[in-house]
Amino acid sequence: MNPLKKGYIRAYLSIPLYMIPVLVIITGCMYLYDTKAGFAIAIFTILYSCVAILVYSVSSRKMADEIMRFATCYGTIQKEMLKEFQLPYAVLDENGRFFWMNNEFSKQTGEDASYKKPIATIFPELSRETLEKTTEESQTIHINQESKVYDAVLTRLEFKPLKASEDGSINGSLISVMLFDETSHEKLKAAFEDQRLVTGLIYIDNYDESIDSLEDDVKKSLIRAIIDRKIGKYFRQADAIIRKTDNDKYFLIFQQKYLPKLEENKFSVLDDVRNTKVGNDREVTLSIGIGKGARTYSQSAEYSRAAIDLALGRGGSQAVIKSRNHVYYYGVRGKEVEKTTRVKARVKAQALREMMETKDSVIVMGHQISDVDALGAAVGVFCAARELGKKCQIVLNTITSSLKLLVDKFGPEDGYPEDMFINSERAIELVNDNTLVMVVDTNRPSYTECPELLQRSQSIVVFDHHRQGSERIENTILSYIEPYASSACELIAETLQYFSDRMQLAPQEADCIYAGILIDTNNFMTKTGVRTFEAAAYLKRSGADVTRVRKLLREDMATYKARAEVVRHAEVYKGAFAISVCQTDEVESPTIVGAQASNELLNIVDIKASFVMTEYKGKIYVSARSIDEIDVQLIMERLGGGGHLNVAGAQITDATVDEVKQRIKDILDVMIEEGEIKL
């Protein structure tokens, strides 16, 4: 259709024609008044009409020719400009195949204009599924190639169906692709990240104990000099600035680009310093905390402070790197170093006393499905609160068969409050601004009996013996987390000795705390130190009776048989790992049976670590144990749990028993391949 037959151009050219009917009307009117004048105007109208029609036909034809010539020229110029455009540009059909590309796109991709294959053959990120999601609103896809980085901007072009040249029909839409070369920007960004400064803190875990074990002053000076030299030599490869802020503390700054190299060798300075021997009986161990990815230097310092706290809270002898959203652990080997000094226990006891004195009441809770250690520690806190005349209540949602005999010793007939033990709902009703909430035997908020209490209270105290992980209870006013301790009951027993000179424990209270130590140490065979036996001696002096405790901890026949079945059906994986499942049909406390069975499996020759899974109340509980060669805490951390070097566990809600078993095997395979586990 002729473009002049419609639109503004036609209207513009038709204006003279619109005058013809006007002149005809004027001519008719003039005939009514004056015939001669009307005849003259009629002749003028006829001449005007002929001229106007002639001019219109000639002008429209010439105008149409000019417009077509302009359009053709404009389209050619536009196509050439687009073809020579410096920005890579291409058009795809609905299947993602190239329909057209300009010279720059051809140059960037190394393909000529005849290339008709899908764009995914060049850029895998631009798959057909991605292209199908493209709309008329532009979307940007980030593309990484070996030497180039692009941002591809995709836009869908909709139109009426038309016929393509030789490739078939196009069903009403094309997709335009523009490439923006971000390589230089990414290099600058990477260079900026590499130049970013990170801060770190280095602590010698057992400086006083190691130095005091040397009697010769010369050896003391020598070991200090060796440690300083090894730390300085190691961080010199990172071009770090190191300043010694105390005898056992260092502060360092270096560029972030050196951090991957330190991570690659897993902070070998930890082992290097550990092997330092100048006649000292104790190994010297380091804890390193590094903060990275911070926006400001002060924030980086906060990250490094949090990282060193995590390293110390996990027992020391390791490096921790903390960024905004992630925490990484390196060099966790060997057992925690027990500190013989009791200064910290004395300080924590006095701090706990001062905090209790400022509150009207105390609510203490352990972890879900409380065990004897959590109960014993809670009873110890109850005794401390009673000494100050403060009301103390213990959150205990489930009283398992292993706890029943112990809990029965604290009834009203024995002189204890009827509401000594409460559930979570009651605890939430009672908590207020004058309530001290104390958590024992766990430092993970999701594991506590009542996580909501932690949200409702501003006064939170944590006493625990498990290594800290990335999940921890925030905003505590007092935290006493010592991974070297055998149990929470050991920490509480030490605290009670310094809490008050008049502290007196009833026999059943001493029995309960002693039982917690006994269970967590597997009858003093696991994770025991000098302070463990000192705590046990204090409880013995306070009235604990070994025979009475043994009777309280006896099991029924069903529990004993269930544990035997776990051992009998254990699978030995790679000749060193025992993996089994605890059935929950006839057992009241299956998670405890699983933990006991995992200890039993270690008595088998060549078994280095054991894993027992228990399905209970919608969760899969994993108990992991080892003797000395395998760090089961690292294994459980990869499974989402935590614990100690030889005692660890996890709780999983998104998998079946078989899936968890396979996850454990996969983790073991990866750690063996990475060298974390050596068989």
Image (spheres, grey):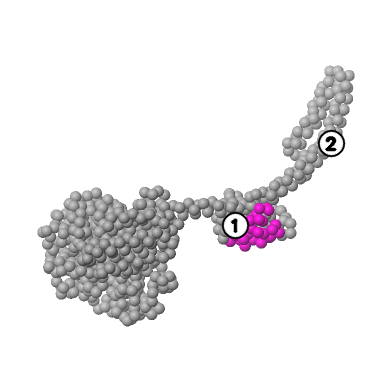
Q: Mark 2 or 1, which is nearer the eye?
A: 1
Q: Residues within 10 Å of mark 2 (few under 14, many from 20)?
A: few
Residue that carries the numbered disc 1 in the rendered image: 131
Residue type pointed to by label 1:
Leu
Q: Are marks 2 and 1 in contact (CB under 8 Å)?
A: no
The answer, for residue 99, to whether it is visible in the render is yes
SS of the residue under disc 2? helix
Q: CA distance from mark 2 to mark 1?
A: 51 Å
Q: Is residue 107 magenta?
A: yes
**In the rendering, at what x and y percent does residue 63 appear?**
79, 38
In the orientation shown, which residue stands out farthest toward the left? 502
Q: Nearer the viewer, residue 527 or 16?
A: 527
**What residue sits 38% from the left and 63% below the top?**
267
Q: Quadrant of the C terminus?
A: bottom left
As helix, strand or loop, the secondary structure at mark 1 comes to helix
Q: Main secondary structure of the magenta part?
A: loop
Residue at point 73%, 44% (across, down): 74
Residue furthest out toward the top: 34
Side (left or right) of 172 relative to 531: right
Q: Quadrant of residue 573?
A: bottom left
Question: Of the residues shown, which amino acid type is indicated by label 2?
Answer: Val
In terms of sequence position, does the residue under pointer 2 or pointer 1 come before the other?
2
User: Does the rendering let one see residue 512?
Assistant: no
For the N terminus, the quadrant is top right
Q: Which residues are magenta?
A: 102-127
> Would you identify the image quadrant in which residue 8 lies?
top right
- In magenta stretch: residue 28: no
Q: Nearer the viewer, residue 34 or 342?
A: 342
Image position of 49 (left or right of 236): right
Look at 77% across and 31% down and name the residue there.
Answer: 15
Can you tell which quarter of the image residue 419 is in?
Answer: bottom left
Q: Which residue is mark 2?
A: 58
